[in-house]
Amino acid sequence: MPINATPEYYKAEEKFRNAKTRDEKILALEEMIRTAPKHKGGEHLLAELRGKLSKLKKEADKKKSAKKEGISKEGDAQVCLLGFTNSGKSTLLKKLTNALPMISHHEFTTVKPEVGMMDYRGIKIQLVEIPPTFRPSHMSIARTCELICFVIKEEKEKKELEKIKEEYYIRVKHIFVNPWKESAEKIKQRIWDSLGLIITYTKDSKGISPMALPKDANVKDFAMRIHKDFVKNFRFAQLLRGGRKMHVGINYPLKHGDILEIHQG
């Protein structure tokens, strides 16, 4: 038994004891490791937990078929659409992306994650529709995305969805959208605003191309996204902001709409 463990640890430990599937055990163990005491007296406990987790993951890898259920991240950010059956997730995915999910009035039409790419001013955002069965293997995608978009029909669904998020130890930021009351364009804008990104532009002989970066990004972050050699051989950057041209250094902070040309030496 761990010394000075948090209530969150004991809650995860109880879920591990009551877990019926390997995926549920993996989720619980990961939460136990996250919340376990980190002092010297807890080193043995952490080693034991990590050993159990490693064993379970190896067993899971052996059982996986050639076709993985996991979704590879693409684009500048990944957003998961979660909601109860017939909440409008598939319709929203179709409106916002190039995906063609099956849409029906029948319940539980979506049985596997559906993926589409949303375009926002040239920036590509991957949207993943999670089936309303909330299987642990599907919910693991939601645990590593940049934003959860809860799709609802009624206000009363909010608390239940937040409870599900907590049950699967999902720490990602979330928003609620209602496609029955909000337009697809408004939802697209809300998704973008919630991601906390800015759009900058690379300038070269071919023209300008958009690049998404965190709001606190600087010229070095911009250059690194192009190639590490642009940082290694950096001389200065020519920045165009609001009609004004200036030469700036590698640590210069960037703003939404900046156009940059990197010069190397």
Image: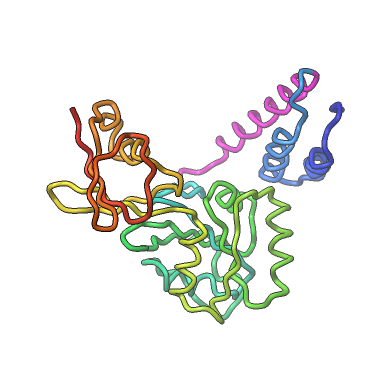
Q: Is residue 233 left or right of residue 77?
A: left
Quarter of the rendering containing residue 38: top right
| Number of numbered discs on residues | 0
What is the residue that sits farthest to the left in this orientation? Answer: 205
Nearer to the camera, 242 or 3: 242
The quadrant in which the C terminus is found is top left
Question: Which color mode does the image show?
Answer: rainbow
- Residue 28, horizontal then vertical, whole percent: 73, 41
Q: Residue at x 49, y 75 (%)?
A: 103
The quadrant in which the N terminus is found is top right
Nearer to the camera, 161 or 240: 240
Nearer to the camera, 89 or 231: 231
Look at the picture and state if 87 lies above or below 44: below
State the predominant SS element of the stretch in magenta: helix
- Residue 177, horizontal then vertical, whole percent: 57, 71
Look at the picture and state if 208 lies above or below 86: above
Q: Residue at x 71, y 37 (%)?
A: 29
Residue 64 located within the stretch drawn in magenta: yes
Q: Is residue 260 left or right of residue 153?
A: left
Q: Residue at x 61, y 52 (%)?
A: 139
- Residue 54, horizontal then vertical, whole percent: 63, 29
- Residue 71, horizontal then vertical, whole percent: 47, 50
Q: Residue at x 55, y 36 (%)?
A: 61
Which residues are drawn in magenta? 41-66
Nearer to the camera, 83 or 233: 233
Q: Is residue 47 left or right of residue 3?
A: left
Look at the picture and state if 258 lies above or below 233: below
Residue 14 located within the stretch drawn in magenta: no
Look at the picture and state if 170 lies above or below 188: above
